[in-house]
Amino acid sequence: MTQINIEKLIADYPLVQKLIDLKQVAWFNPSVTTTEAGLPYVGLTLEDVKDAQARLSRFAPYLMEAFPETQVMQGIIESEAVAIPEMQAALAARYQTPLTGKMYLKKDSHLPISGSIKARGGIYEVLTHAEKLALEAGLLSTGDDYAVLFSDKFRQFFSQYRIAVGSTGNLGMSIGIMSAKLGFSVSVHMSADARQWKKDKLRSHGVNVVEYEQDYSIAVEQGRKEAEKDPSCFFIDDENSSTLFLGYAVAGLRLKTQFAEKGITVDEQHPLFVYLPCGVGGGPGGVAFGLKLAFGDAVHCFFAEPTHSPCMLLGVHTGLHDAISVQEIGIDNITAADGLAVGRASGFVGRAMERLIDGYYTIDDAEMYNLLGLLNQTEAIRLEPSALAGMPGCVHVTRNQAYLQAESLAPERMANATHLVWATGGGMVPEDEMQKYLSQAKGN
Ligand SMILES: *Cc1c(COP(=O)(O)O)cnc(C)c1O
């Protein structure tokens, strides 16, 4: 790997100095293009996302058997979008910025099975792999009722195969629980930031949890190495997987239907702003791709990262993508937002999505905790710290007159806007852990 010349990097990109100083920054991408111009660079299409959606539908009867909590949704793993007017008012007061339009929370935090956005991509990739193995073995055809997979016969079949993944916690939870349920032998390589209760929960499902004292990159690397030694082992590559990405992208298409049912209009006169917490990038990148396919230029996507882990902002802003890590510019990648504790972004996602993301910003840990407390107080909704990163996004947008002008977002249009904060996790945090989180909130 080439050595990074930090002085030159700062001279070329003065914002990098602010990242090094751990300042909360916002960067609106000047190279953002129209949806039409940007989509071809993704390398995936609407057909691919529809294919993923169809695969998830095929698995719905299985999921209803294997996870009875999915029965209310007919085996479809999907979350609600709820209005949060009290929080919107509290944010406007906190940041002394009038916030027009209507704010909603997308509660991926409360998705069944694993309680985070990873219940989209992670579970989808395991199902895709299982389907492929069963089809190739001639044990299944796509026209079958997939409920048959919930049987000793199939558990026996899948037990010959292994799955491995590296994770800061939530991806491991989704992949571990799903894989073990199908019958796979599964190893989850957990980085130092992973919470103890997540490891305990996985072990209770019969998952092999391997712990590291280093960060996410090391956990992924070790997982990859272990898998390479064993041809029966499938490694789920969070940094490069287009399958994970497609699993997340389905959310975008479904949101269109969900909003239509709720009577929420999204078009040129009614813009939609979506604020997505970003770790390695697959989750927010995939969701944003789906949103762009569904809503085109009417949707504006923003990525939010901790001040201690701004890997995507750094990679996209400097154009270096995965050729640079936050550690290489002296940032420690230590954050309470464990789902976002990633030092090097996915090069695949950064390159695929850079033209389609309007902006990026950072938020410090103390503020995530404060917002966690504020959301609990105003709306009685409890999330994990990572999931609050999207919350100040609407303030950055509202304050940026140059951006609003460039995008023809006049006040009349902003008055019709929908601001959607993607709440990425927290629904399964144990009560004692949640009390610790809440006790970190100050000044509410
Ligand atoms: C993983 C995760 C994210 C971000 O997803 P990436 O694919 O890593 O970018 C955001 N929030 C939570 C709670 C997560 O677990």
Image (cartoon, rainbow, N blue to C red):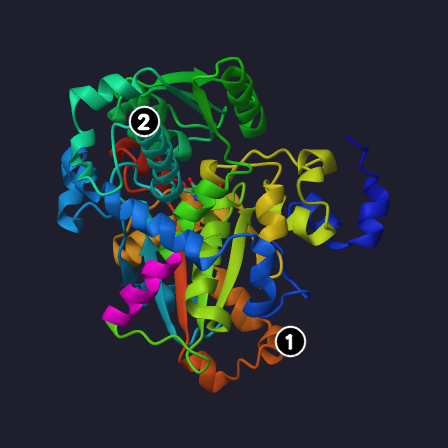
Tell me the chief SS of the magenta region. Answer: helix
Does 258 appear in magenta? yes
Identify the magenta region. Answer: 252-261
Q: What element carries label 1?
A: helix
Q: Where 260 falls versus 254 (above or below)? A: below
Residue beneath disc 2: 179
Residue at image point 67% right, 37% down = 325
Residue assigned mark 1: 402
Residue situated furthest top in the rendering: 229
Say which amino acid is labelled 1.
Ala
The residue shown at (56%, 69%) is 36
> What is the x, y in percent for residue 22?
64, 45
Which quarter shows the N terminus?
top right
In front: 147, or 91? 147
Q: Can residue 248 be seen in this view?
A: yes
- Tell me the CA gap for discs 2 and 1: 48 Å
